[in-house]
Image (cartoon, grey):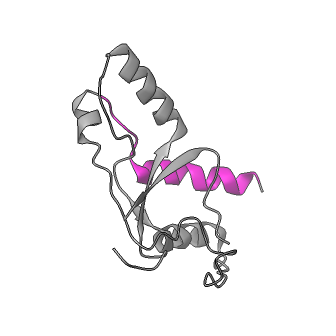
Amino acid sequence: MIDLLPNRIGYYLLTSTMSVYEARIRFIDSDDAARFLLHAAENRLLGPYNAGSPGDISLQELLDRISAATGKEALITDSSNSRSRSPYDVGHSFSLDVSKAVSSGFRFRWLDDILKELIPYFLQRR
């Protein structure tokens, strides 16, 4: 089972038929999510808005970044068994367009900046 950096970030799966390791994932920092909800209320935004960090990443790219930070290779289990299958293994990517939120004046943190901070944060907590 693969567990992606829980608690501090939410995620959006960006989606075609491909392995879980190739599918693109878009994250949102929890602080950005809270700030955007406040921004939406204060600016009386109406209708649907997608929220998420600019940039996306494949699970393989994320595992590579974590491996580089730890100096250890990720241990991957067989996901053919539905009981051990990752919840991120949807078989495709789906990218949310956040331009409407950005055009309302809100600025999300870039995914690269979030991960540069988040990976060391979780490694220090081990």
Instruction: Name the dominant secondary structure of the magenta segment.
Output: helix
- Horizontally, residue 81 falls left or right of residue 99, namely right
Please tell me in which quadrant of the rendered image residue 17 appears. bottom left
Q: Position of residue 122 (x, y in %)?
A: 68, 53
- Horizontally, residue 23 falls left or right of residue 3, namely left
Up/down of 16 relative to 5, above or below: below
Q: Quadrant of the N terminus?
A: bottom right
Q: Which residues are magenta?
A: 106-125
Q: Residue at x 44, y 26 (%)?
A: 37
Question: In the depicted view, which residue is nearer to us: 88 or 21?
Answer: 88
**Within the magenta stretch, is there residue 124?**
yes
Up/down of 19 relative to 96, above or below: below
**Within the magenta stretch, is there residue 16?**
no
- Horizontally, residue 55 falls left or right of residue 115, namely left
Q: Position of residue 110 (x, y in %)?
A: 38, 47
Farthest right residue in view: 126
Q: Residue at x 50, y 42 (%)?
A: 29
